[in-house]
Image (cartoon, rainbow, N blue to C red):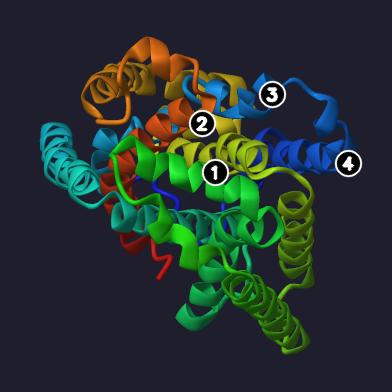
Amino acid sequence: MSSRAVVSEPLPAGVRRTLSAAVVRPSWVALGAAAVLAPLVAVLPRAAVYAPFVASVLVFGLPHGAVDHLAPARTAGTGRWRSMIGVGLLYLVAGGGYLAWWFLDPVSAAVFFILLTWAHWGQGDVYALLAFVDAEHLSTRAERGLALVVRGGLPMVAPLAFHPAEYRRVASAFVALFGGPVAALDPFFTPTARLVAGGGLLALTLVGVGVGAWRVRGGAARHPWAVDVGELALLWVFFAVLPPVLAVGLYFTLWHALRHIARLLLVDPGSREALTAGDAADALGRFARDAAPLTAVSLLGFVGLALVVPGAESLGALADDPDGLLALYLVGIAVLTLPHVVVVTWMDRVQGVW
């Protein structure tokens, strides 16, 4: 019998309490504390701004996709070897094709990465709302789609609206790594483009909140809607007050990745038993063991990428360029993200998210 978490069926109370204590509430505290302490960022050493991305190499961030090869077997009972071979081929074809795209046209590849991450981080939050807090106010595909656009858009669009110079610096580093025309990014950073993007996302946020309130008036549970609204408010403030590199690094590591790991724990029978018993540490330890081999392989892949990208004349020179090093890491993440999104989208389908 499968242990998968189907979002149309509420999680057992004990599992939900454990996930709330180990995943959901700590993410609120971490991002909330960072937002409160935002005035101190100006006096921090530059290295501190990059620290969350550095930590994400081993803590939650990169490893959160390193168990994809087991996801089909654990989610739908697919044979283990079939699961591993199928996902391996997916990564080889989709990831390899996307890597070639970066070399051929880095501007469009970078834009696609932003859109892909937008969709993926949105789908991650939609699943979390449905599974972890039983969001009855997201009862239709249209409402879930709107939540996906808003939730995924916050880490991608809000920094553009509030911190365009820093956002542009990182985006330009993507393109520069592959010798592409950095000036081609100019249209995305005009005041009009930023106003349309930021204002449009704010408008969609308010529409989503309003539709949710209407659902609550019609009988949907109020608490999940209040959690949704509270998280939206937190994320808007968080991305408005913190510089993009720090904000996105923290969000990736302590919000998105951690919630996806929780999802994976729910489809692993041993981890789910640990969660039921209130032992989140044991469940996370099991995940760490499963993720370690392919996390190590990914790190070797990043080293190989550093040796071939045109903008990295030498590893030593790249190590002295924090923006270039971050860009290299994120391009590697991008290559891994495309097949990862395919796996997660399949999980969404099997688990009834859509």
Measured in 3D between alpha carbons, the distance from the residue under mark 2 to the one under mark 1, in whole angstroms, is: 8 Å
Marks 1 and 3, the one that precedes in the sequence: 3
Three-letter code for the amino acid on which mark 1 is drawn: Arg
SS class, disc 4 = helix
**What residue is pinned by disc 1?**
169
Three-letter code for the amino acid on which mark 3 is drawn: Arg
Measured in 3D between alpha carbons, the distance from the residue under mark 1 to the one under mark 4, in whole angstroms, is: 25 Å
Taking the image as drawn, is residue 263 in sight?
no
Seen at 60% across and 20% down, the residue is: 281
Taking the image as drawn, is residue 247 in sight?
yes
State if disc 1 and disc 2 touch (CB < 8 Å): yes
Where on the picture, by quarter, is residue 103?
A: top left
Marks 2 and 4, the one that precedes in the sequence: 4
**What residue is pinned by disc 4?**
36
Crowd tier of the residue under label 2, counting other residues whose Cα lies within 10 Å: few below 14, some 14–19, many 20 or above: some
- Extreme residue in the top direction: 316
- Any mark on residue 232, and which? none
**What residue is pinned by disc 3?**
46
Three-letter code for the amino acid on which mark 4 is drawn: Val
- Any mark on residue 323, and which? 2
